[in-house]
Amino acid sequence: MRYLISGGGTGGHIFPAVSIANALKELDPEADILFVGALGRMEMERVPQAGYKIIGLPVRGFNRQNPLKNVSVVIDMLRSMRMVKKVIREFKPQVGVGVGGYASGAAMKTAAKMGIPILLQEQNGFAGVTNKLLKDDAKKICVAYEGMERFFPAEKIVLTGNPVRQNLVNGSREEAFEYIEKEYGIKLDPKKPTLVVIGGSLGARTINEAMIQGIPAMQKAGINVIWQTGKTYYERCHAAYEEGTKAQEDNRIICTAFLSRMELAYAAADLVVSRAGASSISEICLLGKPSILVPSPNVAEDHQTHNAMALVRKDAAIMVKDAEASEKLVSSLLQTIADKAQLEKLHTNVLSLAQKDSARRIAEMVMQIAIH
């Protein structure tokens, strides 16, 4: 069987695409999988790292500020579609999988026109532009949230959740505390509640600013804190951290640019503070972690707010708006982490929203479409 997978631009698109490919390989070890991405974007590096072949298209997003520049964007889109036509004639896929992003639009539209059945995977609670444009061409649309009928035909929707890193479920709290002491030289107290703050690989400015201001209050509360700043903000955060903790004999705050053992950070966490990207939310649901979500305002259609609200409406998470983070985040997290009943309620409710084995379920559906 030959599978064409397309999409990318961000880790939120690439990770599900690679997970689906891995699941296809598990179910069908002889599978031939080819990726189509956008030149110069993250997928051109990440997909080969995962062991798959990828072809890059000169496709780009539209320039909303300067419409005149879109003439070259349209030309590149037409070139990309011609390239995809050639790829499909040579590769002869039985099915196409689109996960969103510029390349996915060109690849899946062309595949559908050439009579190749396609399946779409939508990660967010507010559907992306590409998947909305492709909805009529798709045989099935795999979604992570309920209520997606406002974007897609109801009969095509399958609630599968988003694929997440499988190793995340492997961590234990005991191992986490041992690793942290060895790695960072700081002994956390297993009897105290533990806060894990995740700003993403680059970091989240407002979350970090709030954390800088909150160092004295968190020290006073005596909680364990594992604070991942992201590389962009690490120097500034670390300087404030050094200043704020140097007089403390009993420091239980860890400040790091990057968490290499994410499964152990999650295992240690009683409460997680995070952006509301699709992958982060899927991980929080799967692991049943109480969370405070601070949606990024710098994303298309404000989709992170929609993602967060899907949990907030079910009493499965707390949301703090990005604009209010400096004022409300630290007081909200200190109040929440001290309230055992609230933590238990969030844990129970968020765990009930988890979709397990998402990648495998999507892969099974892809294979079914290919056979029929």
Image (cartoon, rainbow, N blue to C red):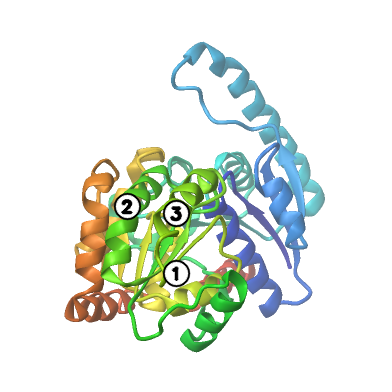
Residue 195 seen by the camera:
yes
Q: Which residue is mark 2?
A: 294
Tag 2's secondary structure? loop
Q: CA distance from mark 2 to mark 3?
A: 21 Å
Count up the numbered dots.
3
Name the quadrant containing residue 93: bottom right
Judge by depth and name the residue closer to the eye, 47 or 215.
215
Look at label 3 and name its amino acid. Answer: Tyr
Residue pointed to by mark 1: 283
Q: Could you tell me residue 351's position as x and y percent? A: 33, 78
Between 247 and 163, the one lying in front of the other is 247
In terms of image quadrants, where is residue 353?
A: bottom left
Q: Which residue is mark 3?
A: 241
Q: Residue at x 45, y 59 (%)?
A: 246
User: Is 171 situated above or below 2?
Assistant: below
Cβ atoms at labels 2 and 3 below 8 Å apart: no
The kind of secondary structure element at disc 1 is: helix
